[in-house]
Amino acid sequence: MRRLSTCLLLLAALLVGSLTAEAQSYVSHKVKKKETIFGIARQYGISTEQLTNANPEMESPDYKLKKGDIIMIPVADKDGQPVTNTTPNDIRRRTIRLGVMLPLHNTNNDGRRMVEYYRGLLMACDTLRHEGISVDVRAWNTPEDGNINAILQDPEAARCDVIVGPLYSKQMAALSNFVEQNNILLFIPFSITAPELYTNRNIFQVYQPVNELTENTARRCAEWFKDFHPVIIDCGDSSSTKGSFTATYRRHLEVLDIKYNLTSLKSTEENFAHAFVLDKPNLVILNTARSPELLSVFARLKALANVNPTMRISMFGYTEWMMYLQHQQENFHRFNVYIPAPYFTNTESTLASQLQQRYVKNFHQDMMPSLPRFAYTGYDHAVFMLRGLHKYGKTFDGAAGRFGYQPVQTPLKFERIGNGGLQNRSFMFIHYKPDGTAETINY
């Protein structure tokens, strides 16, 4: 595996500040049999030093040039000196200038999460470099109590093509004005309040507001499972916020004229069983996402299934249930659980495994044990946005089908919000099938 680029190795040392690679234009070259570093450099009219500077892995004592390798060739002028692209206004034919404005520090969990996210982003830049996509990365540490306006006075900020950030809602107004004035795209990676989305066409926002997500999830659930018999269970959790979901879901059921039953964890076994039917599959929905109540429901459903072995039972859950997967995977499969989620990490996939190994090798530590995995999130976001900019320039709108995109964890599909910016509308169910496998259903 090739070493990562210089800017990535700098991050490994946690150098936080303005991280930059030389603004340089490149083309890619696939190595043929018997080619040498000297011969390739002479073919393109550059020096071997310029070639190795563009491919830092060549400096390794054990490096060997192999047939099929993809290496980067810096564009050179007649004197052999690297030059920037001759069409600087066309982002598709030059280095993409990427700015990152997130809390990149080690003083609290926000900073540590964003450092991991940033590392994933830089790993994506390294991957894209081998595809011939050159990226100049500059990062600014923007803690919650930081002065975003002072950071925006840095001349390098105005040179960015796209900025990833912010993490805090209170920094949105200043950043929104800045990107609009300088014709910069703003990619908001996490769920913050951003009313500017509805007026600023330069903004991409990954996550939907909670009320919109609740409405869309309830509608999709009612439509997708229209042939099921819904059973809504009151779990007696006074602290739950999921009542808004079950209320919205019931409203959609009534619009579709779908009959449903209500029951409670406090119900007798007889009354609990009466909420279910035998002539069609039952869809169980709780009004809480907490683990203790979920365990109680599993116990009730097991008892019910033992008495009625032909009864078909499925469950529709909440994203929070993914945190219980390690201990409840058997129950998820047994009861045919569907979980709505904006992300899904198949840790056994080849790409996820390779990224995990690269992360440990370059940063000498594991990813944080959190869901979602922030390094995967940063990788997905960067690959999606940078490939889009490389192909379409600043007309890229993030819509479905713009290019081949296979996420490690986070599917993305943007739609324009009125005359404002673009919001991710990707949605999927994670289905834990009775045969022990899992699938993602895009809806």
Image (tube, helix red, strand yellow):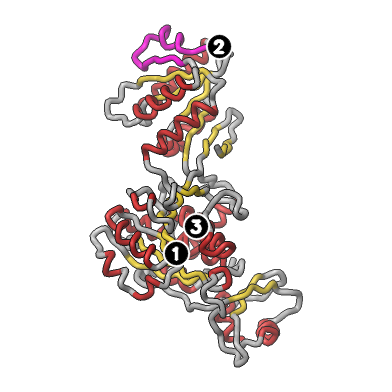
Instruction: Say which quarter of the image contains residue 100.
Output: bottom left
Say which mark, if any, is on residue 62: none
Dots 1, 3 in contact, CB < 8 A: no
* Lower sequence index among marks 2 and 3: 2
Q: Tell me the mark number nearer the camera, choosing from 2 and 1.
A: 1
Say which mark, if any, is on residue 162: 1
Residue at point 42% right, 20% down?
Answer: 232
Residue 270 inside the magenta-drawn segment: yes
In this orientation, which residue lies closer to the viewer: 103 or 266? Answer: 103
Instruction: Say which quarter of the image contains residue 29.
Output: bottom right
Say which mark, if any, is on residue 278: 2
Residue 399, position as x, y percentages in the image: 55, 50
Q: Amino acid at mark 1?
A: Val
- The stretch of residues the image draws in magenta is 260-277
Residue 32 inside the magenta-drawn segment: no
Q: CA distance from mark 1 to mark 3?
A: 16 Å
Q: Residue furthest front?
A: 419
Dots 2, 1 in contact, CB < 8 A: no
Name the residue tied to disc 3. 379
Q: Amino acid at mark 3?
A: Tyr
